[in-house]
């Protein structure tokens, strides 16, 4: 089993969703997971291999999947020879709909789909055709409210696909107990609110109501990573967001995200993102949207 990277996405509590529309020559992102839902569309990818949980499948020319939070996934080059693949990724949190919407009949199909997404869902070619025009223009839409409406339209189209297939097995896509989820969310909330400050293991363990040694073991088992790694990736997530959405210089971003050394920030960023902050900004500047 490959090591699983836990991705910290650029989403903030003020965003409905994050979308990136990019062209690539090969799949290179390693196996990873994140707490957000992800819609991933790829075209010109015939022969590539899609891995979602314990599901491994070769894909055709077009590919559209929905992946629930915490489910490992990645795409592998395999036999794909295409020189120009297009990939559109949309990430959004479980709370994208107000709580008052959850019981409304209009959202019934979408709620059912999101529940099934914990196994990963692959959509039919007919649904890909129906949703293509929205996917094709969503990132470029200048009117943010219209963009949000089109996002909801996309979810509605996907939710009506009676031929959508669950990918991962039930035994693989296991769920965390509610009380464990609450403890982890409490810790993550504190880190999200204080990541620009110095955070110690003792502080976090106290919030979780555990000893530092017990918490270290618990956090690693629950998230697949150490507290230090999670904190670094939280800071990198914020830095990535600022690189994509602001014109702040890299030094300002470094210190505003809790790093106290610019060369260390550049080194860590490159080792975990595969590019320097400057290269990352150039790559994403013209093809990403936070809504």
Image (cartoon, helix red, strand yellow):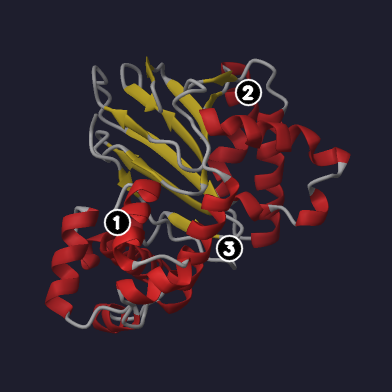
Q: Residue at x 22, y 55 (%)?
A: 272
Q: Residues within 10 Å of mark 2 (few under 14, many from 20)?
A: some
- For residue 113, above or below residue 59: below
User: Which one is in front, 217 or 200?
Assistant: 217
Front disc: 3 or 1 = 3
**Circle count:** 3
Residue denoted by label 2? 127
Mark in front: 2 vs 3: 3
Residue at x-position 39% and y-position 22%: 54
The residue singled out by tag 3 in the image is 15
Q: Secondary structure at mark 1?
A: helix
Q: Is residue 2 above or below residue 254?
A: above
Residue 279 visible in the current orientation = yes
What is the spatial separation of the Cα atoms under label 2 and label 3, in whole angstroms?
Answer: 26 Å
Look at the numbered discs 2 and 3 and tell me whether their residues touch, using CB distance below 8 Å.
no
Q: Residues within 10 Å of mark 3 (few under 14, many from 20)?
A: few
Residues at marks 3 and 1 touching, judged by CB atoms closer than 8 Å: no
Q: Secondary structure at mark 3?
A: loop
**Quadrant of the image for the C terminus?**
bottom right
In percent of the image, x 28 and y 83: which residue is there?
A: 255
Quadrant position of the N terminus in the picture: top left
Residue 226 x/y as whole percent:
28, 57
Q: Position of residue 23 (x, y in %)?
A: 34, 41
Relative to 282, 138 lies left or right: right
Vertical relation: 234 (above or below) 220: below
Q: How far across and how far down the image is residue 115, in percent?
A: 64, 34
Sequence-wise, which precedes: disc 2 or disc 3?
A: 3
Residue 84 on image: x %, y %:
30, 32
Res 147 visible: no
Q: Circle 1 sits on which residue?
A: 283
For label 1, the crowd category at 10 Å Cα-Cα, with few meaning under 14, some 14 to 19 and many 20 or more, is some
């Amino acid at each position: 089993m490959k090591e699983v990277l836990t991705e910290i996405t650029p989403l903030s509590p003020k965003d409905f969703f994050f979308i990136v529309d990019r062209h690539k020559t090969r799949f290179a992102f390693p196996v990873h997971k994140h707490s957000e839902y992800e819609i991933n569309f790829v075209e010109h990818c015939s022969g590539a291999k899609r891995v979602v949980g314990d599901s491994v499948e070769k894909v055709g020319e077009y590919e559209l999947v929905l992946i629930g939070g915490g489910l490992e996934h990645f795409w592998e080059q395999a036999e794909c020879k295409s020189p120009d693949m297009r990939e559109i990724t949309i990430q959004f949190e479980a709370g994208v709909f107000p709580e008052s919407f959850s019981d409304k009949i209009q959202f019934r199909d979408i709620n059912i789909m999101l529940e099934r997404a914990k196994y990963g869902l692959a959509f039919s070619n007919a649904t890909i055709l129906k949703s293509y025009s929205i996917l094709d223009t969503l990132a470029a839409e200048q009117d943010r409210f219209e963009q949000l409406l089109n996002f909801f339209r996309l979810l509605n189209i996907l939710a009506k696909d009676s031929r959508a297939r669950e990918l991962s097995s039930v035994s693989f896509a296991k769920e965390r107990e509610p009380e464990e989820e609450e403890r982890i969310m409490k810790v993550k909330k504190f880190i999200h609110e204080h990541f620009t400050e110095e955070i110690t293991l003792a502080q976090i363990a106290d919030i979780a109501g555990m000893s530092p040694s017990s918490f270290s073991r618990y956090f690693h088992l629950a998230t697949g990573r150490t507290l230090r790694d999670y904190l670094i990736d939280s800071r990198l997530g914020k830095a990535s967001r600022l690189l994509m959405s602001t014109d702040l210089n890299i030094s300002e971003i470094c210190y505003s995200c809790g790093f106290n050394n610019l060369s260390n920030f550049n080194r860590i960023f490159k080792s975990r993102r595969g590019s320097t902050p400057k290269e990352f900004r150039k790559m994403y500047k013209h093809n990403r949207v936070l809504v």
